[in-house]
Image (cartoon, rainbow, N blue to C red):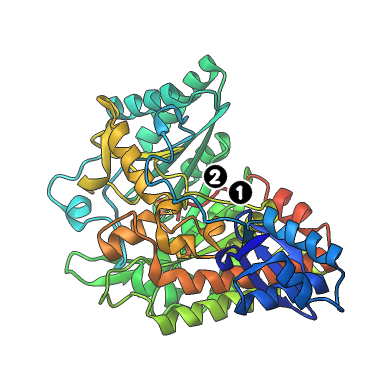
Amino acid sequence: MELQFRAENAHAIAYGEKTILVAAKSMSLFVLDPVSEAILLYVQTHPRLTLDQLTQELAGRFSPADVAETVQEFLNLHVFITAQPIPHPISPLINIEHFPLGSLVLNVANKCNLHCTYCYEPEAAKYGPSPVQMDWDMAKASVDFLFQRAGKNREVNLIFFGGEALLNFQLMRKVVAYAEEQGQECGKKVDFSLTTNGTLLTDEIVDFFQEHHFGVTLSIDGPKDLHDKRRSFLTKHGERKGSYDLLLPRVQRLLQRYTARPIVARVTVTKGTVEIARIYEHLSGLGFFEVGFSPVTAKNGEEYGLEPADLRQVLAGFKELGQLYVERALHSQYTGFSNLSTLLTDIHAGTNKLFPCGAGLGLLDVDGNGDIYLCHRFPGTEEHKYGNVKEGLQYDRLNEFLNSAHVENKPVCQTCWIRGICGGGCYHEAYTQFGDGALPNLHYCDFLREWTEYGIGVYMELQEKNPGFVETYVLRGRGDAPKELT
Ligand code: SF4
Ligand code: SF4
């Protein structure tokens, strides 16, 4: 039998004395036995071979039956193939026309009371002379759009976003009442969530969240010295004033008063604010259930952008915090480091993504004009506007984009062993960096591969030393903590 080794489908990771094989086509993990290890070693230098050749090479160490059985397992995993692969289909790989909508992000306000230096929203939209706040007519049309497109989904998600969403809190109240009414009429549960900068929180707002079981994500970048570096107000005199002092009592009040669901802190990591462990200690000390870190999206040359050396520091910080996570997990204690929990969840599930996220598939964004975008980061970007809630969704254009962004249409991703976990990289990151949302996030690939390899090591250790931990504390223990919008 003619065999071809497919290196892109077989990534080996050393784990103590053992070797783990990541079979990338199915994102499944295997501890290699001696015969598998010997075969994989041999094919590094002999990627094209026959079964007879392999059997002879390993004769004396392994029986022909053992070699043949292992080769068959590798064939099942696409680590070996027997014939030239059929060229990949270019397009279309999917048709989204009948794909049900599960989540709608409502940009209820595009204004913001903060002037964070790294914000990805266009300045003109946020602070220009005529910023567009969503009005009731458009909000109602958006909720109707969600229900019309929800298909058989038994639950739909409405996600409030800005600018700063709480600048339009009165509209949020009306939207929630209307969506609950519509949900009842068509027998669908509606889940509400929002991301907020927290500076406008009041007891009245917190109680409203409590009543409607909101998933709350708060944008905060750590202790005062780090947070104030880039999350600031702009005074009348054009000076920057950090927002931490105003935010802190509001956050404390929120964490004390809001008990309906776990609250998540979302940290944007920028140049000069890469102290991951210190940020985590501070925010978990305040009482956040989980802390999620997002490396900032920045065009080349931005002062806050992360250069390769900064990314190394972020990774070192992730691993330092990961060490604490493991130590505590071995005593059945959960550490709310959401980047690692999400990775462990994906590894455990054998997640095999074709896209990086649900943007354009089960999730869409609507801005104050009713215009529909891929996700919350795209409002104002004409290229990624796909219709209007009153005029309908432009399926053809959206389909075309998603097919071009499908991981099987990204040649570089096809040779990457973490493609099933990464899915080809965030569209907005690619759009900002390269002007094309369908390109892979090449500047983050090494970071992601090393982080995934680390996560697999953590997963193996936890499965070996505290086998129930991932299911009990990571899958079930996170409960209904809101999933962050990145
Ligand atoms: S974007 Fe990079 S890390 Fe992600 S699948 Fe493609 S090559 Fe791999
Ligand atoms: S990963 Fe990127 S494209 Fe996807 S929802 Fe998040 S910001 Fe949008």
170 sits to left or right of 458: left
Type of amino acid at the residue the image marks with label 2: Gly
How many numbered discs sit on the rendered protein?
Answer: 2
> How far is the residue under mark 2 from the one under mark 1?
7 Å
Q: Position of residue 174 (x, y in %)?
A: 39, 28
Residue extending farthest top: 185
34 sits to left or right of 295: right
Q: Is residue 140 above or below residue 323?
A: above
Residue extending farthest bottom: 309
Q: Is residue 363 above or below residue 304?
A: above
In the depicted view, which residue is nearer to us: 30 or 276? 30
Residue at the (75%, 77%) spot, across then down? 57
Q: Are marks 2 and 1 in contact (CB under 8 Å)?
A: yes
Q: Is residue 71 visible?
A: yes
Element type where label 2 sits in the image: strand
Q: Which residue is mark 1?
A: 481
Element type where label 1 sits in the image: loop
In the depicted view, which residue is nearer to us: 17 or 328? 17
Q: Position of residue 134 (x, y in %)?
A: 28, 36
Residue at the (39%, 41%) spot, across then down? 360
286 sits to left or right of 423: right
Residue at the (80%, 81%) spot, across then down? 17
Q: Is residue 108 visible?
A: no
Q: Which quadrant: the C terminus?
A: bottom left
Q: Is residue 213 above or below residue 217?
A: above
Type of amino acid at the residue the image marks with label 1: Ala
Crowding near the residue tagged with mark 2, few <14, some 14–19, many ≥20 C-alpha atoms within 10 Å: many
Q: Position of residue 416 (x, y in %)?
A: 51, 65
In the depicted view, which residue is nearer to us: 157 or 41? 41
Disc with the residue nearer the chain's start (2 vs 1) = 2
Q: Which residue is mark 2?
A: 215
